[in-house]
Image (tube, rainbow, N blue to C red):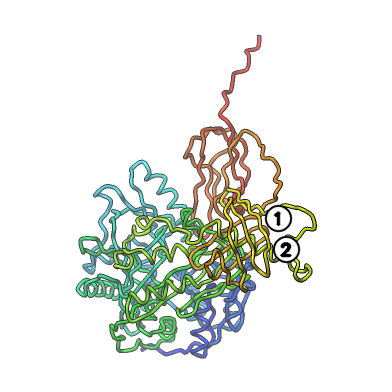
Amino acid sequence: MVNVKPIRKLLIANRGEIAIAIARTCAEMGIQTVAVFSNVDRGAPHARTADEAVRIGPAAARESYLRIDKILEAAQRTGCDAIHPGYGFLSENPEFAEACAAAEITFVGPSPEAMRAVASKTAAREIAKAVGVPIVPGAEDGYPVIVKAAAGGGGKGMRRVDRAEDLDEAMQAAAREAKAAFGDESLFVEKYIDRARHIEVQILGDHYGNVQHLYERECSIQRRHQKLIEETPAPRLSRETRDAMIDAALKIARAIFYRNAGTVEFLLAPDGRFFFIEVNARIQVEYAVTEQRTFRNLLRLQIEVAEGRPLPAELPEYGNLHAIEARLCAESASNNFLPSSGTILNWRAPAGVRVETGVEAGSDVTIHYDSMLAKLIATSSSRQDAIRQLRTALRKLVVQGPVTNRLYLLHLLEQPAFEAGETHTSFIEEAGPASNGFEEAKAAALLTAFLAARAAKGTLAGVRANFRNNPFRDPQMKFEIEGRLIDSSYQGLENNLYRVQVGGVNHAVELRGAARVEIDGLQLTAHIAQDGELFIVDTATSSHRFTRVSRYPQSESGPDHETANSPMPGQVLRILVEPGKEVKPGDPLLVLEAMKMEQTIRAGIHGRVGQVLVRIGQVVQPGQMLVEIGPLLDVKASPTEA
């Protein structure tokens, strides 16, 4: 018999939106909460949301959020009798669950035994086989294959390989990434199933042997093997296949005596066969879409199960609600989804959808944690209406500072194939790049008028911004965007009306309020944010980033060499060359790490390394010079001495 032990005070061993959601649920249940925060998260929203908060160390996760000893010390210091790990960090660490038990602290999650049973994907595959659930074939069928980390999840330690000659490098990179993320560099290789769908089943178990499901989620739209858009129910999925997947998930859950929340994940091949791939022994990022569809609070159910309460006897009805989630991330979709960092200059969440976020205006987005800023979830009685709601929300969302994927998410949702429910794990490659909906020249004209109006403040009433009492040409401004220069000039006509010339074309710009503008007869809402000399001009369907430069730049002249520059903010993980080494185009120079991903920087020319300008562990910024490569000069032998 399991004793019900109500939780009085719970420590949240996480950060961001999941920490806030857990704190909100605990408040509804009458449970006190304690947050933990690293040095860079001292003023973060999640630290303020809980009743108390404890600082646990430096920014690096391995020195703060991944330190079992510091988490337990914080829990004991504040008198907590339970810990919720959220997702990521320590959520699937059986040693953490055991340490909680040893300290007589309730761990809100599965048992250490269940975690260990599925911690290795290879071991989990054997469990699936034992209960009759099909698994993905191995690599014996040839390329393409996929290299996977045996431990962990979230797309870490995964590489698709299309040629045998690329396998060794892919395995080395995957092993490093897996080691950094999970402390385990074990890998395995399996056949890559082209155009497969990624479908997962939400499971719940309690201490009494009850195992239930809360239906399935479609998670096929991914980049770097990490999900961007999730929905439930999965479109174009027959009831027969859905029921078979759910039955397979429950078989696996029962085989490992699973309790608390978890997810069993499958690949659905184009021919209709499905294969088990892994169990995530934790709550998932996309749990909110299941909550929207079923009206069940999964975080509350997790806590109730941890207290020793049985699961509700009845499942919610299948129903006709549809929920779709989009993950807003600090990353550049046009630059291979490389992460972005910086300060959130402007933030306004849209109405009409559920928004889960851990950021606000003024929040710092650093290289140390995941790039996700928020989740937007739309719910309606039809899939079409849910898609429309989510599109509208993305248009109305205001987020300025780091580069984000807001417009790219909108681009994906507008694809005819997405509307038809024809998604698969290669969907992003087929969708192509997003277009910027507002012309660059008009955005530059708008920015020019905005800066001219700001400069005019403080002048005598009725005096135009560009007034001179002698002949003088129109004031000018110069901007740089993506390495190109844009020249503009303006005339202040009357009130907030300006004539702006960009690239020889005149534009009429009227500033009609804080965010409402009219340009060439078209009224729209535009937001302008500034970070030093960087200006961001956003509308519902566009985002342009201009850097204001001097009208009289210094002449550009430099040494006859090339430099490898950082494409993203990050930390130098490995240096692969040294001064004097000969390199060819494509040769690896060094490896950067940021927001849980690795990026190999490669040579662009045939030459010789002159200087390595960084060191291992150094944090670098976008555009920073990393390695200097000079021309490949012949080294002549010195004359033979007589």
Instruction: Point out the tag, 1 or 2, that comes first from the N-terminus.
Output: 2
Residue 192 position, x and y percent, is 30, 54
- Residue 59: x and y, percent? 61, 64
Q: What residue type is disc 2 on?
A: Ala
Is residue 341 in view?
A: yes
Residue 476 versus residue 236: which sits nearer the camera? 476
In the figure, is residue 609 to the left or right of 151?
A: right
* Residue 435 position (above or below residue 242): above
Name the residue rendered at 43%, 55% in the picture. 185
Quadrant in which the C terminus appears: top right
Mark number displayed over residue 465: 2
**Residue 6 left/right relative to 251:** right
Where residue 242 is drawn, which disc sits there? none
Q: CA distance from mark 1 to mark 2?
A: 9 Å
Name the residue located 37 percent from the left edge and 45 percent from the top edge. Answer: 167
* Contact between labelled residues 2 and 1, with CB atoms less than 8 Å apart: yes
Q: For mark 1, does the 10 Å Cα neighbourhood hold few (<14), some (14 to 19), or many (20 or more) residues?
A: some
In the picture of the structure, the residue carrying the numbered disc 1 is 475
Q: Is the residue 602 above or below the residue 582 in the image?
A: below
Residue extending farthest to the top is 642
Left or right: residue 416 compared with residue 56: left
